[in-house]
Amino acid sequence: MVQFFVLSCVRRGIGGICRFSFIAFLSLNYAYSQPLRATPESVDYDQGGEFNFVRVRFDTYYSSGFRGGPWAIDFPDADRNFLRGVSRLTNVRVMSDPIVLDLDDKKIFDYPFLYMLEVGQGGGLLLSGNETENLREYLLRGGFLLIDDFWGQQQWDNFYTSFGQVFPEREIIELDPNHEIFHIYYDIDGPQMIPALFRSDDFGEQGINSASNHAILDDEGRIMVLINWNSDMGDGWEHTYHPEYPTRYANSAYQLGINYLIYSMTH
């Protein structure tokens, strides 16, 4: 079975987020029968491609982003492997190298998809006024932010307190498994707990043994911020070719990531 989408360039207001025109298609049978395993394969990257992976560099209360910190976990292998997976499993033209940007950089408006992780570590995010305003404007203009890989109630509380300054007037809701983002490309049975290397999805890392997805919506109901709580897609991408990492976890990470990507470029 093949699903396909024709995506068009959309600008939401002056200087809004541009979604490049392309046709993306995927054979679901191929995706399931050909897991991303063995060794990395060559990919025809395209510097004029529609998609690049943009990782957000950020400070926490206990660390500066310029000296590394939680933002750099799994980097760059996870980012490069995800680009490789998008190129292999879809017809989306991808750029070769992941990008790292700060939230106060105007270049974030050139990309419809941002990625953050470990946002509950180090006491939580430490956002400046410029970062807060730039991110808020980016999201309201049509941008999409994926937040990944943080676990347990303490890390949630750290994230909730610090990120609340971006949209203090908007609630964080829990997504129902029937939400279209789980079915827009792959048909996925809702949130998936994707564990770290040498861990199992039988038990969570911080005492909560099930994954959940949460979101911040705009006034039209579009997901602006998608939050993976108690799941680690980045490890699924990073350890794609590790012989001790179960293929089913890597497959889930790519299926979810591609769904999120397609959603971000069509909404």
Image (spheres, rainbow, N blue to C red):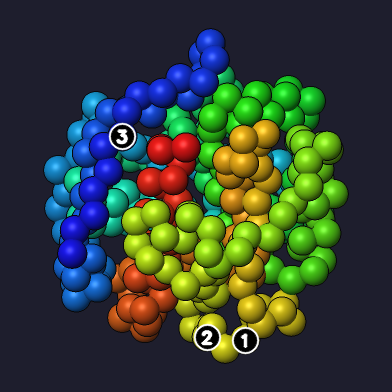
Neighbour tally class for label 3: few under 14, some 14-19, many 20 plus, Cα within 10 Å:
some
Say whether marks 2 and 1 touch (CB < 8 Å): yes
Residue 259 % position (x, y): 40, 54
* Residue on which disc 3 sits: 7
Which mark is on residue 244? Answer: none
Of the pair 145 and 205, the residue shown nearer to us: 145
Q: CA gap, disc 2 to disc 3?
A: 37 Å
Say whether marks 1 and 3 touch (CB < 8 Å): no
Residue 236 % position (x, y): 43, 68
Precedes in sequence: disc 1 or disc 3: 3
Q: Residue at x 24, y 73 (%)?
A: 32
Residue at the top extreme, as displayed: 14
Tag 1: residue type?
Phe
Tag 2: residue type?
Ser
Residue 261 against residue 89 in the figure, above or below: above
* Residue on which disc 1 sits: 203
Neighbour tally class for label 1: few under 14, some 14-19, many 20 plus, Cα within 10 Å:
some
Q: Residue at x 54, y 15 (%)?
A: 13
* Residue on which disc 2 sits: 200
